[in-house]
Amino acid sequence: MILLFDNNLGLINELGKENILYASEEKELGGKITSEVSYPYVFHEDNVEYFGYRENDNLQIYKIVNKKKENGKMHLVGMHLFFYELKGDVVRDLRPQNKTIKYILDEVLKNTGWIVVSSLGGTDSINFYHRSKLECFNTAIKKFNGEFKFEIKMNSKGQLIKKVYIEKMISDDKGKWFEYGDKLIEVIAEEDQSQIYTAYIGMGKGEKTDNGGYGRKIKFTDALWQKASGDPVDKPIGQDYVEIKELSNKYGLRIGIKELSEVEEVNKLLEETYKCLVEDSRPKLQLKAKGISIDIVELRRNMCGCKTRFKYKI
């Protein structure tokens, strides 16, 4: 059975085995977990953002990162909730010395809702500076020669209890999307959300040191942007990232790091980081069409409330 959820992980629909056209899960050894599922489009709802399944009393939940509507079928590709949440969050400065992996990962996963349960002993030292939480997690797991697995359960209040277990490594390394005429025989629309960020921390050129070298990279933490003054978004003093709040409300706050090593001035860094964010804060849409004659075919899709037209010569 496949479960379909909205953006707040509210259950929308349950699809029985008879309605599932295809389902698979791919697990990389010590790495991320992805899943794919296809079902008749008639069962699809536009507000589906997650899918999953039950494994005994455990839930496996995936954030949809790619949607494809084709020939009356809906095909979804999902990234496991753990990897999706960590990829969109940042560790700014963490330097634990001679600490256990549980201590380190408790710090890395702080404010994510994930609970670390570890059976690994030993201590080690590690440094993280402006890296994604997913990168930090993977680095720590590798350093301690560990493996991990997940447990997600829902309590009586409908809240998710999310745990990651760390252990010693034991393994070797009916709808069509568009309306079209009889000359257009196939239309495929594919939406990719895997690289969406709704906020960026900009990292510019390293600050010059007294000995002529370069130290920590410049940031725009102390810069101020105000929409009331004509700036594109609000960015308060003391906030080290620039954010498009409307898209954070839609996809959740997903912070990335944007390296702009040639930029030397703080305000310029903020401007260039925002330009990059505009490009990377929306799903990538790929449209494909097949036809039987040479015509101009218009493919229409309503994106973010705006009517957008795509013209293709078939």
Image (cartoon, rainbow, N blue to C red):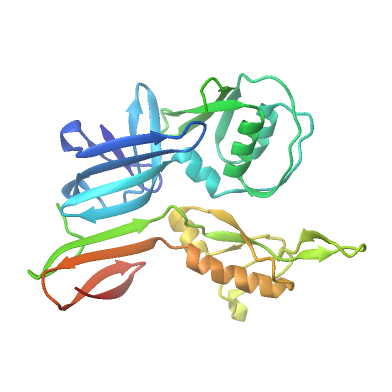
- Residue 126 lies in what quarter of the image? top right
> What is the x, y in percent for residue 277?
54, 65
- Quadrant where the C terminus is found in the figure: bottom left
Compared across the picture, whether 26 is left or right of 242 comes to left
Q: Residue at x 23, y 60 (%)?
A: 188
> What is the x, y in percent for residue 121?
68, 19
- Residue 312 lies in what quarter of the image? bottom left
Q: Residue at x 66, y 27 (%)?
A: 144
Compared across the picture, whether 293 is left or right of 260 comes to left
- Residue 290 lies in what quarter of the image? bottom left
Asked if residue 87 can be seen in this view, the reply is yes
> What is the x, y in percent for residue 263?
70, 71
Query: Residue extending furthest front?
Result: 173
Q: Residue at x 47, y 55 (%)?
A: 195
Compared across the picture, whether 108 is left or right of 33 comes to right
| Residue closer to the observer: 147 or 46 | 147
> What is the x, y in percent for residue 31?
50, 36
| Residue closer to the observer: 92 or 264 | 264
